[in-house]
Amino acid sequence: MDHTVFRVKAKEMVDYIADYLEGVGARRVYPAVQPGYLHALLPRAAPAQPEPWDRIMRDVDDVIMPGLVHWQSPHMHAYFGTPTSYPSIMGDFLSSALNVLCFSWASSPAGTELETIALNWVGKAIGMPDCFLNEKTGSLGGGVIQTTASEATLVSLLAARTRTLAALCKLEPHVEPTTFLGQLVGYCSDQAHSSVEKAGLIGMVHMRYIESDYKQSMRGDKLEEAIISDKAQGMIPFWVCATLGTTGTVAFDELREVGNVCQKYGSWLHVDAAYAGSAFICPEYRHWLDGVELADSFAFAPSKWFMVTFDCTAMWVKDTAGLQRSFNVNPLYLRHENEGKAIDYMHWQIPLSRRFRALKLWFVLRNFGISGIQDHIRTCIQRAQQFESLVLSDNKFEVPQSRVLSLVVFRLKGDNSHSERLLKVINSRGKIHVVPSSFKNKYVIRFCVISPKTTSQDILDAWNEIKLCAQDIIIDKIG
Ligand code: PLP
């Protein structure tokens, strides 16, 4: 494809994308395909000769589209979705064309500096304290874009591990740092995301899952009990991950209590606000940030609810030098004459190379403005409120835990099997898409609203669809 063909085909692609996003609501959101369907439709080897572009695009329509879950559909209510937006798509488009790697300042000065600026903007917009920002030369804090919330959690655990092992080796200089590994123990709530457990596995440390309270929140007293008990056994508590907005029910750990315990025992506190962090752009939800100044690191994913295309996770740390101690290797071929005067993000993350992700974030911030993003968040929450009221108005259903932000968890009253069956029927019909979760041994269905395209009518339609699916189940049971 040369420049001339690209000019034509890329313009066609823009129309294809706009048509797709405009019409995605009319498609089945959940595909009716079985594992292996694509293997039966595509050749077993790459073509030996170039193929015409139009034939490739025909295959996109004929074989790829039918096998997609349409995450941009207004009827997508599964997981925490990932709503994109035109400014963000344009950022990704331009970033793909530039294809610069922003691992050091020298590898892409504008890429590096825009990332710092965009993270300062976002940090201020969601109410992060100044100690996490990088505005003045010599400032200790700073933000970085990681790929995912999982990666941010792992990065924080590894940084905490380095900090603790370094402190222990100072006390016992003749001992190898790895000697202490088996004693390190991290903590999170029993409601934390599985990525926290994975970080513990990769970091080769013990993990404790603190029993959450009736609000599904991790409390300081339970955490402290566990820490005291571990210390008595000779273990070394070193890292705590608090969640603001759990995956199952959007529960919030008691951040100030947890933070105070971390300060008392010298543990690194990481805050995982993957989904809920976007809501902090609205001042009325910032009360959940109370105590954040006690944290060492904090992450949320603008790609979950901020209309920034996946992937993009904003992470801030208070002591960036501490973070860099874990990831700093500096061979000659990566060195440059401005080292020390500028940020080299390669020392803040696991891989070396990194995309120009700040561009799409910057486009979104500028083109929507803070008020545009606030409107989006508040509208999603209103839609979720509407859905919750509809569920509560029907006595066959229950909402075992009240809606928080834009997530409603609901179930059919009675045996778990009713709701399990309901979920299967809903997804097999493909008109809306939902996934389950469990709440106090009850099987619940999560209904999350994150799309700017979901209208009030869509919510009514979704509810009618759910009632219809439930009707079939009850008739089945009686029959
Ligand atoms: N943390 C929480 C609270 C989540 O809800 C999720 C995913 O939904 C994650 C972490 C993992 O996110 P990612 O896919 O960005 O790693």
Image: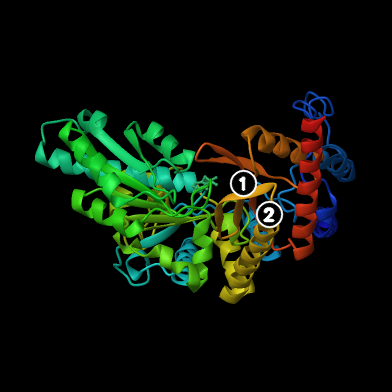
Q: Residue at x 15, y 38 (%)?
A: 169
Is residue 333 among the parts visible in the rendering? no
Q: Residue at x 64, y 68 (%)?
A: 376
User: Residue at coordinates 42% horizontally, 36% vertically from top-left?
Assistant: 197
Q: CA distance from mark 2 to mark 1?
A: 19 Å
Q: Is residue 195 visible?
A: yes
Q: Residue 293, image x and y in percent?
A: 32, 63
Crowd band around label 2 with a 10 angstrom C-alpha radius: few (<14), some (14–19), many (20+): many
Say which residue appears at 32% left-offset and 57% top-offset.
Answer: 295
Q: Position of residue 333 (x, y in %)?
A: 41, 45
Q: Is residue 302 left or right of residue 7?
A: left
Q: Is mark 1 within 8 Å of ligand 1?
A: yes
Which disc is residue 391 wearing?
A: 2
* Nearer-the-camera pick, 49 or 118: 118
Nearest the eye: 359 or 435: 435
At label 1, counting other C-alpha atoms closer than 10 Å, the crowd grade (few under 14, some 14-19, many 20 or more) is many
Q: Is residue 460 above or below residue 431?
A: below
Q: Position of residue 323 (x, y in %)?
A: 32, 51
Q: Position of residue 370 (x, y in %)?
A: 56, 74
Q: Which residue is mark 1?
A: 79
Mark 2 vs ligand 1: CB below 8 Å:
no
Above or below, 388 relative to 446: below
Nearer the observer: mark 2 or 1; the answer is 2
What's under tag 1, amino acid-wise? Tyr
| Mark carried by residue 244 | none
Q: Amino acid at mark 2?
A: Val
